[in-house]
Image (cartoon, grey):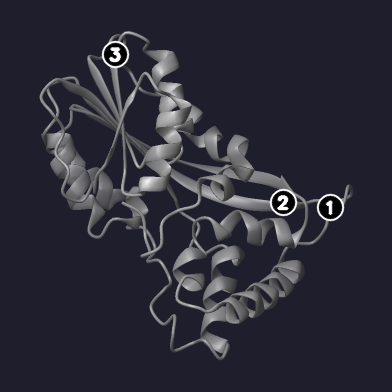
Amino acid sequence: MRSSTEDWNPALYLKFADERTRPSRDLLAQVPLEAPRRVVDVGCGPGNSTQLLAERWPGAEVIGLDSSPNMVKQAGERLPAARFEVADVATWQPEPGTDLIFGNAVFQWVPDHPAVLHRLLAALPEGGVLAVQMPDNVAEPSHVLMARTAAEGPWASKIAGATRDELPEVGAYYDRLKSEAQRVEIWHTHYQHALDGAAAIAEWFKSTALRPYLDPLDAAERQAFLAAYTARLAEAYPARVDGKVLLRFPRLFIVAVR
């Protein structure tokens, strides 16, 4: 489900666990289900979002899926009562009786994901819910500067094409899902994360958006790339009164009821 050939690092991802879990909480709060039979957390990562599902619906069967064996292992240790599997959401099909498909920050990595979302929603029973959150930050300085650092460095040929595409416009999601849905709710939230300087912003993205840039590089190139990227971040994100910087992080939310 996630990008790159190397496996994901749960410890690095969890350095900002509270900030990363906040969108899951916000998405879950809008899911209109009382007693689902089975809930599936696709792109479950280390299980922080899966734990929220298990706490809200203790009587439901809870399943977590991720393409990363490391993430699945970590999630299973965190939440042994749930079932975790290695799977690719691009081809995965929900079992009968699945009432919720919950996807937090995963579908932006999936090729032609609007078609995948349509297929998954169509597979749910009447009243079932598809709830999705995706980062919508490709136009933010954090990502513009990633692409600039990639294009202007000696590593440019190694990481050409690493930049993630922008999400489709909101209306495209609505039109694609409405044919299978009673109701489609779509909104944006712009988070402002107070972090400890430009280096912390780079550290945040090392476990996610920077991976397609860093994975093809050798150790020396990675160090040089991160140094150049962090220097640009320091100019783009000024220190606030307490020395912290504010990382503006737009996210797109979709809740569709079958």
Q: Position of residue 182 (x, y in %)?
A: 18, 26
Q: Nearer the viewer, residue 116 or 9?
A: 9
Q: Position of residue 44 (x, y in %)?
A: 38, 38
Q: Residue at x 37, y 60 (%)?
A: 3
Amino acid at circle 2: Leu
- Marked residue nearer the N-terminal end (1 or 2): 1
Mark pair 2, 3: CA separation: 38 Å
Q: Quadrant of residue 39?
A: top left
Label 3 residue SS = loop
Q: Nearer the viewer, residue 94 or 172?
A: 94
Task: Indicate left or right for 70 with 241 as reference.
Answer: left
Name the disc covering residue 246, or none. Answer: 2
Q: Nearer the viewer, residue 32 or 179?
A: 32
Name the disc covering residue 203, or none. Answer: none
Residue at mark 1:
240
Name the disc covering residue 60, or none. Answer: 3
- Marked residue nearer the N-terminal end (1 or 3): 3
* Number of other residues with Cα within 10 Å of mark 2, as a class: few under 14, some 14 to 19, many 20 or more: some
Q: Are marks 1 and 3 in contact (CB under 8 Å)?
A: no
